Image: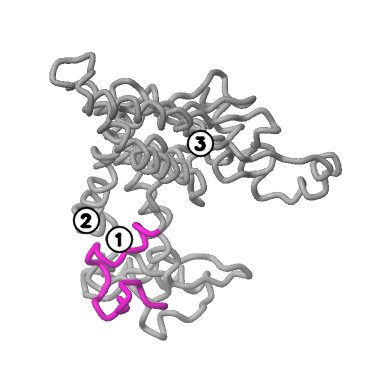
Amino acid sequence: MSNKNVITNLTIKQMAESSAMGFNKDYIARSSDVNFDILGKAFRDTGKIYAKLKIAIETNNCISDYCEYEMNKVKQLEQAPQAALDFLSMIISNVEITEEPNFDPNNNFEYTVINSILKERPGFSKTDGYDIALHLLEDGTQDIIFTGPAFEKPLVINNSALNSLNEAGTTIVASTPDITKDMVKLLTEVNIFSPEDVSEAGQLKSGAKIKEEFILKTADGNFDYEIVEIGNGKGRNILKYDMDRIKRVSTPFIEAEIAATMASEEETIAAWNVYLSEGKYWSYTEDLPLDQNKQNEFSKKYKDYFMNNYLLQFTKNQLPTVPEDAMVFDLAEAKKAKAQAFIEANNL
């Protein structure tokens, strides 16, 4: 199913972003009926039912004691139109998540289809075989049923069930956290950059450098450099960082960000699938709730992703801050000088 979700979601996305339908002569030559008349069909006979119930109550000709059933039904019918509008609005807000730029295509493709139907996208009209039916149920709740070629069977959503999920902070489509934005912000919070390197907007300024206290030094207090070859027998120094200390200082901030992301399990899966998985996707139907092993795996991958994709750029190939140490030099002479310094330091 996961593979089908990915293929179908990406295909629909490609269709939505493509102009191909505009050049399809068969498509532009036929009418396209998108009038699903959702509310009209649902409330077509409710006026008559409402009138009969009101008459029964007013004439005391009810089938229930004290007209309790009739009064409850009248109340349901009076509330039903607004409930239906709220229901549709709730569905739209859920399925619109499929349009987010970092949307996880491992989500159930049927919700992308629903969004395409409700947005009246080409290829998802009544003419194309799709339909929507809203039903008022005896218990006062409402069902909406989507049918059409892309659905394996009619997709039914109940308004009370959907409302319960939304009140609990859960959606039927997982939104993917913007890890890129989170990690850029995290760089300013890990306490390895000077406050003056952070802009008022909370971003690292251009040219920001890791604090000097995290740069390795020799026993005599000078910077400890790594020599890299740049070709033609030449080399230059680059700074060496105390990565163990950087990780120790950064870890509490990273773990706090991880905890915030993992507060929503479905968003954790979305973040994993979109940013961290490397092709090893998790399923919304099979992997929820997340077991401890997956939580640990997510935490480790998140830390590695931050270190390798965001922090590394500030520790790799950084030139010395001392001008004379940043100059290009002859590798052979440098190696000879280093050997001589070792001999003198060890009285050899």
Q: Is residue 51 left or right of residue 34?
A: left
Mark 2 burial class by Cα count in 10 Å: few <14, some 14-19, many 20+: some
User: Mark 2 or mark 1, which has the lower sequence index?
Assistant: 1
Give the amino acid at mark 2: Phe
Q: Residue 104's x, y, as percent?
A: 48, 40
Three-letter residue code for mark 1? Leu
The residue under label 1 is: 186
Q: Name the residue under label 3.
A: 40
Instruction: Give the answer, above or below, for where 146 lies relative to 120.
Output: above
Task: Name the image quarter holding the C terminus.
Answer: bottom left
- Is label 2 in contact with label 1 (beta carbons under 8 Å)? yes
**Helix, strand or loop status at disc 3:** helix
Of callouts 3 and 1, the N-terminal one: 3
Q: Which mark is residue 112?
A: none
**Which is more foreground, mark 3 or mark 1?**
3
For the residue marked with disc 3, what is the amino acid?
Gly
Q: Residue 253 carries which label?
A: 2
N-terminal-most mark, 3 or 2: 3
Give the extent of the magenta segment.
181-206
Q: In this picture, is 3 found above or below 202?
A: above
For the point 74% across and 51% down, the residue is: 19
